[in-house]
Image (cartoon, rainbow, N blue to C red):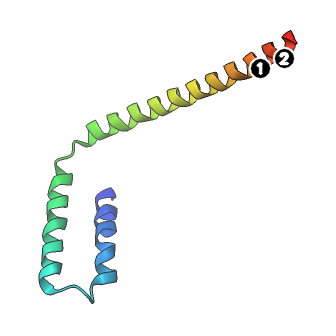
Amino acid sequence: MRKIGLILFLLSPATVFAQQMSQQDMQDMMVQVQEVQACMQTIDQNELNKLQEESKKLRLRSKACAITVKEMKRRIRQWHTARK
């Protein structure tokens, strides 16, 4: 399903500019689409899923660090305020 969506996305400019494109341009584009399809077939879906999970974990860790930094700044401001 993702492959079809990507192909449609790649072809969407073709529908907009189809009237301005020559037959050779269309054939060249179709060759490029076929190359993209062939390349996508070589992608290991399991490896891609692992990368997505790792990315998700890193995003969560990054958010946690940002929250921690924000909390530390808040506590430092409170400490400075309390000292005055």
View extreme (front): residue: 84
Q: Quadrant of residue 75?
A: top right
Q: Amino acid at mark 2?
A: Thr
Contact flag, marks 1 and 2 (Cβ < 8 Å)? yes
Q: CA distance from mark 1 to mark 2?
A: 6 Å
Which label is found at residue 66? none
* Crowding at mark 2 (Cα within 10 Å: few <14, some 14-19, many 20+): few
Q: Amino acid at mark 1?
A: Arg
* Crowding at mark 1 (Cα within 10 Å: few <14, some 14-19, many 20+): few
Residue at the spot of label 2: 81
Q: Position of residue 30 (x, y in %)?
A: 16, 72
Tell me which residue sits at (48%, 33%) in the image. Answer: 59
Task: Determine whether the residue tagged by mark 1 lies in a helix, strand or loop.
Answer: helix
Image quadrant in which the N terminus is located: bottom left
User: Is 45 in front, or is 6?
Assistant: 6
Q: Position of residue 14 (x, y in %)?
A: 28, 78
Q: Position of residue 44 (x, y in %)?
A: 22, 42
User: Is 41 in front, or is 65?
Assistant: 65
Q: Where 75 falls versus 62 (above or below)?
A: above
View extreme (bottom): residue: 19
Tell me which residue sits at (33%, 35%) in the image. Answer: 51
Q: Where 76 falls versus 10 (above or below)?
A: above
Image quadrant in which the C terminus is located: top right
Which label is found at residue 77? 1
Q: Where 81 falls versus 21 (above or below)?
A: above
Is residue 64 found left or right of 30 in the rendered image? right
Tell me which residue sits at (74%, 22%) in the image. Answer: 74
Tell me which residue sits at (30%, 83%) in the image. Answer: 17
View extreme (top): residue: 83
User: Is 69 in front, or is 5?
Assistant: 69
Task: Determine whether the residue tagged by mark 2 lies in a helix, strand or loop.
Answer: helix
